[in-house]
Image (cartoon, grey):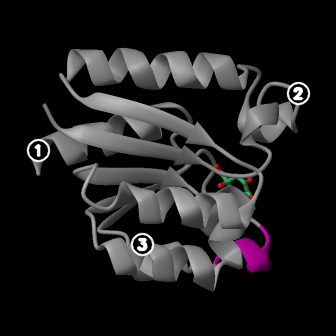
Amino acid sequence: MKKILVINGPNLNLLGLREPALYGAKNFKALEEFILSVAAELSLDVELFQSNHEGAIVDKIQAAYGLFDAILINPAAYTHTSVAILDALKAVALPTVEVHLTDISTREEFRQFSYISLYAQKTICGKGFDGYKEGLEYISRL
Ligand code: DQA
C-alpha cells in the first residue's frame, strides 16, 4: 500500500470560519475526513499533517524521506513565499502534488506565483475539497 503524506499549511485549520465565501463553509475536520475517505477508496495509506509553522512543515518533509512514497501538499500562504519548503521538497525528491482550494491564478497578483510549482509534478487549483481527491487519484496512478 502506497504511503502518502498530506500536508496542510497555515490557516487551513480555520476552514469553515475563514473567509467562507472563498474557502467554503465546511470545516477542517470535514476536509480531513474527506481525505481519509478518498484514501480508503483508493487503498492509500495517508498520514495527515497540518501546521501554521514553516519550519515544522520543513521538518515534516525532511522526515518523510524513506518513509513515504509521495507528498500531497496545500502549502497555503507559504506557497507564495517559501523557498525553504521548495528546497525541502527538492531535497527529499518524492513525487509531489500541490493542491489549492481556490484558483490562485485568478486571485490577487501576489498569489499567482507559486514556489512549490517549481518542483511539484502536478498542481490542482480551484476545485475545493475535490482537488485533494484528484491529487490522490493522480498519486495512486503513479
Ligand atoms: C490556498 C491559497 C493561498 O493563496 C492562501 O494563502 C491559502 C489557501 C488555497 O487553498 O486556495 O491559505 O492555498
Q: Earlier in the sequence, mark 2 or mark 3?
A: 2
Chief SS of the magenta region: helix
Q: Nearer the viewer, residue 57 or 17?
A: 57
Q: Which residue is mark 3?
A: 89
- Judge from the rendering whether residue 73 lies leftward or rightward of residue 122; answer left or right: right
- Judge from the rendering whether residue 54 lies leftward or rightward of residue 95; answer left or right: right
Residue 31: x %, y % from top left: 58, 24
Q: Taking 14 as reference, is 135 above or below it?
A: below
Q: Earlier in the sequence, mark 2 or mark 1?
A: 2
Q: What is the CA distance from the residue labelled 3 to the residue labelled 1?
A: 20 Å
Task: Give, as a three-letter code, the residue at label 3.
Answer: Leu
Q: Which residue is mark 1?
A: 141
- Judge from the rendering whether residue 76 lies leftward or rightward of residue 19; answer left or right: left
User: Within 10 angstroms of label 1, few (less than 14), some, or many (20 or more) residues?
Assistant: few
Q: Nearer the viewer, residue 81 or 64?
A: 64
Give the residues drawn in magenta, as a range.
Answer: 108-112
Task: Give, as a three-letter code, the residue at label 1.
Answer: Arg
Task: Give, as a three-letter code, the residue at label 2.
Answer: Leu
Q: Taking 42 as reference, is 81 above or below it?
A: below
